[in-house]
Image: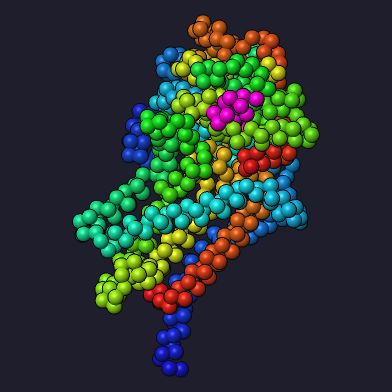
Amino acid sequence: MSYKNNGDTPISAKKFMEELRRYQKGSVSRRHFLGVTGLGLATAAMAKAMPELAGIGKAHAAANIGDRVSIATWPNYYDPANYEAFTTATGADVQISVFGSNEEMLAKLQAGGTGWDVFVPTNYTISTYVELDLIQPLDLSRLANFDEKHYIKRFIEPGTVNGKVYAVPKNWGTTGFVLNRKKVKTDPTTWKAFWDLTKTDASGRVIVHDYQLTTIGNALKYFGYSFNSVDPKELADAEKLLLEAKPHLFAITSDYQPAMRANDAWMSIAWTGDGLQLHRDIPEIDYVLGKEGGELWSDFYAIPKEAPHVDAAYAFIDYLIDPKINAREVAAHGYPVPDNRTTALLPKEMTEDPIMYPAQELLDALEFGAAVTLTDPLRAEVMARFKAA
Amino acid sequence: MTAAKVAGKNGNRVTAMLLLPTTLWFLLLLVMPLVVILVFSLGERAPAGGYQAALTLEQYANLPARLKAFTNTLTLSPLGTLICMVIAYPLAYYLAIKAGRRAKALLLTLVIVPFWTSFLIRTYAWIYILGGRGIPRLLEMIGIEDLRLINTPTAVLIGIVYGYLPLMVFPIYVSLEKLDKGLLEASSDLGANPVRTFLQVTLPLSAPGLITGSLLVFILLMGEYLIPAILGGGKVFFVGNALVDLFLQSRNWPFGSAVAVALVVIMLVAIALYLSLAGRERGRQDVSII
């Protein structure tokens, strides 16, 4: 952002009043006013020196970032109070689109004209976004709250492609399943048991994600194959299992909380935070990681190439990764963060929660999603056939 | 050149100018997208998804992979249309012929009122009504256990009838409203009983409304996406859902285009069949439409 007055030439009192009148009458923008009077710079400098003064924070509170910021994210994945506070502090309305799969996000970005300023890609998708030129490299000097040394290495790595940082970590987590102990009488601890129950005792009460990575991945696990397999024979086995299970499913959706809460569904493939949120409200709902393994993931904040409000995007990301704000996010949604500063601020019952931080031997069995699954035509078609069957 | 001829020529020019926006609209928003879809349907999926130029019929050969979506659409759409017709007719009949002025105004308003709320929100409300805490819970009280409604074809059908009923009521109502009541008296004077009067006079005369209403509902239903997505839980797939999936998840634009073309063709054939049947029926009964 370039200010017309760079601070060397102080503005006269008369000129200041003239500009103020022009601003009041609406003939110049707030941006022009702040720039020409040097007020924007002054506030920014002051806010930087004394963060407490600016309320929530840093330069983004003072600079004019426009009236909106649009984010594409996942279900049940933020604290509404934080987003409202951002709007109050900056005047930028937060517009939220919620998605059920990375494929859907990619499809929208490929088609163009999304209007998103920030989106939340998962680890394995970032290299494809770079390849397709849909994502912009981040200017880390604009993210004052980001400091690599505080982050867990393996969760930060996927954000860097060819030596350039394209994304900064939001949360990490696992993909397991939730089950209602009052309704499901056995104790499934594996994906094999998950699918077998689906076809028997829990028939009609099971939800799988509307998302090829997790639904196909965990069907592959039934046979002991890799979560990321693109082998045609292995995918054929998984497809057969999925088609057998389909009549026994309650729904195919990535927004499974409402049906679990209503007792319409008894089991569902689930992510960490949803497991925690459900368990917190309904103690008989448990979160289980399949012993055979499954997915370990990390999500990121990133800026699409075509983002219309880049200033707002940086301000918003920097606001959200501020450890204090981030800790409030975690308290609300229950997904762990790879940022040690934030984790240090969490209450003990969260840092000791087995849903958020599963036992090491369960974690060891998990795999990161692989980039190839995002674009593999066969996986896409297996999922589409399963849904249309 | 006579004055009439000049007027005629000017008239043609005016007509042409008045038709210009419509023609442009038609070319831009109907013909162009159709051409694009036809071209796409002959192409290939790009490696990362999307479209890649090619000349192949492979996508059409793959159509049977979506057979279930087509059969779902082709059974639930006509069925939904039929149920709408059966429910809408008595209502429209009552509104147009039996109801007093005040009752008519009130009932017509009631038919319109749902349109004041977004269709999406009204359909969401049905998730609750048909879900475990809704109708099934009530039925449990009278001893009908473990009834599953939500995410079944029945739920989709209920949503369809709920959403599309007004579209059927109005055309039938309008055609019955225009009906000359003298004809009903004449029929009865000539010795026809009420059933015969209905079958031979009222029903044929309201046929245009029935045809308009059922076409309106059927055509919209064939492209339906929202109701199966919300009340079918991703399990009751229409062609519309398959299309959204192909474009927005698997990013297979060429196959999606082929499915879209197939849907258009099926729809055209179905409508042509329906119209010719309806026309023959009317011809047999020898009653003019107007």
Give the quadrant of residue A203: top right
**Does residue A109 appear to the left or right of B23 in the view shown?**
right
Q: Which is nearer the eye, A137 or A184?
A: A184
- Within the magenta stretch, is there residue A202? yes
Decide which of A247, A382 is in the foreground and name it.
A247
Taking the image as shown, residue A209 lies to the left or right of residue A64, namely right
Q: Is residue B288 magenta?
A: no
Q: Which of A45 and B46 is in front in this view?
A: B46
Choose between A100 and B70: the one closer to the eye: B70
Q: Position of residue A258 (x, y in %)?
A: 47, 28
Expressed as whole percent of the image width and height from the top left, the position of residue A349 reads 51, 7
Can you tell which quarter of the image residue A287 is in?
A: top right
User: Where is residue A212 shown, x and y percent of the image?
Assistant: 65, 33
Q: Quadrant of the C terminus of chain B?
A: bottom left
The residue at the point 46 percent across, 80 percent down is B12
**How many labels, in total?**
0
Asked whether the viewer can see residue B222, the reply is yes
Q: Residue at x 65, y 48 (%)?
A: B66
Q: Position of residue A312 (x, y in %)?
A: 51, 30
Q: In this view, does A343 lie above or below B240?
A: above
Q: Residue furthest bottom?
A: B1
For the question of whether residue A126 can be seen, the reply is no
What residue do we see at 39% from left, 33% from top? B139
Report the magenta residues as a range.
A196-212
